Amino acid sequence: MSVIATLKIRGDTETFKKALQDRADEFRQMAEQGKAAGALHHQFTVGDGYVLVVDEWESGEAFQKFVNAPQLTEFIGSIGGDTSVAPELAYGDTIDSPDRF
């Protein structure tokens, strides 16, 4: 059973959006590493002073292992994330419902 995982990271969203363009190859490389580690789906949203990562993973353990890697923390800091503030992490098992689409 897969899990939906969210990670809310405080930081400079303009720096982040610029990094999406300027460092696209690095984002692609991270995506490939995530897929190899068990990521099934991935996307970002941007809010007022934060980036929200919305993922689907094979398991919560695989997600935890990936997001706790020191290289990911370094990368997040280099693209505008405030690594002095712990990100808000949540995940849970996916379930079916009549209104799911």
Image (cartoon, helix red, strand yellow):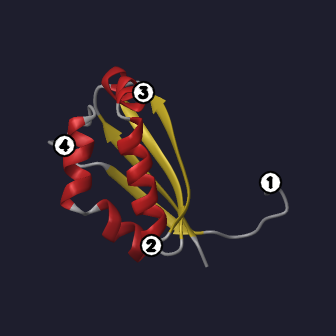
Residue type of the residue flagged with mark 3:
Gln
Q: CA distance from mark 2 to mark 1?
A: 22 Å
Q: Are marks 2 and 4 in contact (CB under 8 Å)?
A: no
Q: Secondary structure at mark 2?
A: helix
79 relative position to 8: left or right:
left
Sequence-wise, which precedes: disc 2 or disc 4? Answer: 2
Viewer-nearest of labels 4 and 3?
A: 3
Viewer-nearest of labels 2 and 3?
A: 3
19 relative position to 59: left or right:
left
Sequence-wise, which precedes: disc 1 or disc 4? Answer: 4
Q: CA distance from mark 4 to mark 3?
A: 21 Å
Q: Position of residue 28 (x, y in %)?
A: 44, 47
Q: Which quadrant holds residue 9?
A: top left
Sequence-wise, which precedes: disc 2 or disc 3? Answer: 3
* Circle 4 crowding by C-alpha within 10 Å: few under 14, some 14–19, many from 20: some
* Circle 3 crowding by C-alpha within 10 Å: few under 14, some 14–19, many from 20: few
Which residue is the site of mark 4?
83
Q: Which quadrant holds residue 37?
A: bottom left
- Return the mark for residue 21: 3
- Return the mark for residue 32: none
87 relative position to 25: left or right:
left
Image point 39% across, 52% down: which residue? 29
- Return the mark for residue 60: 2
Residue type of the residue flagged with mark 2:
Gly
Which residue is the site of mark 1?
101
Q: Which quadrant holds residue 79?
A: top left
Q: Secondary structure at mark 4?
A: loop
* Circle 1 crowding by C-alpha within 10 Å: few under 14, some 14–19, many from 20: few
Image point 35% across, 20% down: which residue? 14
Sequence-wise, which precedes: disc 4 or disc 3? Answer: 3
Asked whether 13 or 39 is in front, the reply is: 39
Q: CA distance from mark 1 to mark 4?
A: 35 Å
